[in-house]
Every structure is written in C-alpha cells, then in structure tokens.
Image: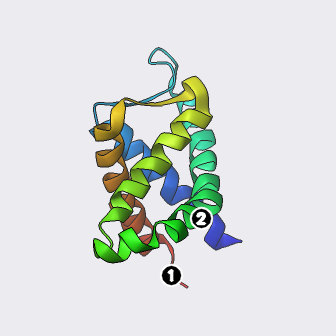
Amino acid sequence: MSSLFFRFVANAVALAVAVWVVDGITLGDGDADTGARAVTLCVVALIFGAVNVVVKPIVSFFSLPLLILTLGLFTLVINAAMLGLTAALSGDAFNVDGFGAAFWGGLIISIVSWAVNLVLDRD
C-alpha cells in the first residue's frame, strides 16, 4: 500500500514540475487559490496514474516492434501520448497544448518521477 502512495506522490510532484517548467502545460484555472490548485493536481495525478496502469501497458505491447527498432526511444512518444490522454480525460483541469509540450512534459515527468521514487521508496 505504501508503494502505491509513493507512486501517487511521485506522479503529483512530477506533474507539478512539468506544469512549472513546460510552457504548453497548464493546470486548471490560473486564478484559483493554492488549495484548489493542489486538489486539482491530486485529481490529475490520480487520472495520470490510472492511465499509466491501464492504458500504457496495452499501448506498449502493441508498439513493441517500434520499441525494439528504436531501442526504446519510442517510449518517449508513448509517454507523450499518455500525457495527452490524461489531458483529454481531465477536461479543463489539465491542458497540454500540442505534441511538443506533451513530449517535453512526458520526458520531465519520467525523470522527476524516477528521481522521487528513488528517494522515497526505500524498500
């Protein structure tokens, strides 16, 4: 159970960093207070986690030839697609403007969530 919580925290932190760094990624209403933005970030992190658990393995399986051909670099495209799907499922709570923003956001989210999981998960 704690591993699931650590993944949720890692996703939330990684999404927050992506919103902060990438210009084309926005979180909710810009006029909302900090508490409302934190709740929105938690909801988006839950949606992002669910997309990564349910959809990403299926997409990765069907794109296995491309993953092998590109030596795994196609994973960056898959991560961008998962971020775009999260934005589509989130409605107005989370917006990604184009593939470029999704690509860089997916790269940043991958790196930050790896680092946070490395620090938090001490099992």
The spot of residue 8 in percent (x, y) is 58, 57
CB under 8 Å between discs 2 and 1: no
Q: Please report the residue visible at 33 percent of the width from the left and 72 percent of the height from the top.
A: 72
Q: Depth-wise, is mark 2 or mark 1 nearer the camera?
A: 2
For residue 36, above or below residue 45: above
* Left or right: 97 as drawn, with respect to 21: right
Give the Cα separation between the discs numbered 2 and 1.
29 Å
- Position of the N terminus, as image quadrant, is bottom right
The spot of residue 16 in percent (x, y) is 42, 43
Q: Would residue 36 be visible to someone looking at this image?
A: no
Label 1 amino acid?
Arg
Label 2 crowding class (10 Å Cα cut-off): few <14, some 14-19, many 20+?
Answer: few
The spot of residue 111 in percent (x, y) is 33, 62
Residue 113's disc is none
Q: Is mark 2 on a helix, strand or loop?
A: helix
Q: Nearer the viewer, residue 58 or 36?
A: 58
* Left or right: 116 as drawn, with respect to 90: left
Q: Residue under label 1, please give it.
A: 122
Q: Please report the residue visible at 36 percent of the width from the left and 67 percent of the height from the top.
A: 115
Q: Please report the residue visible at 36 percent of the width from the left and 55 percent of the height from the top.
A: 77
Q: Residue under label 2, please give it.
A: 58
For residue 22, above or below residue 93: below
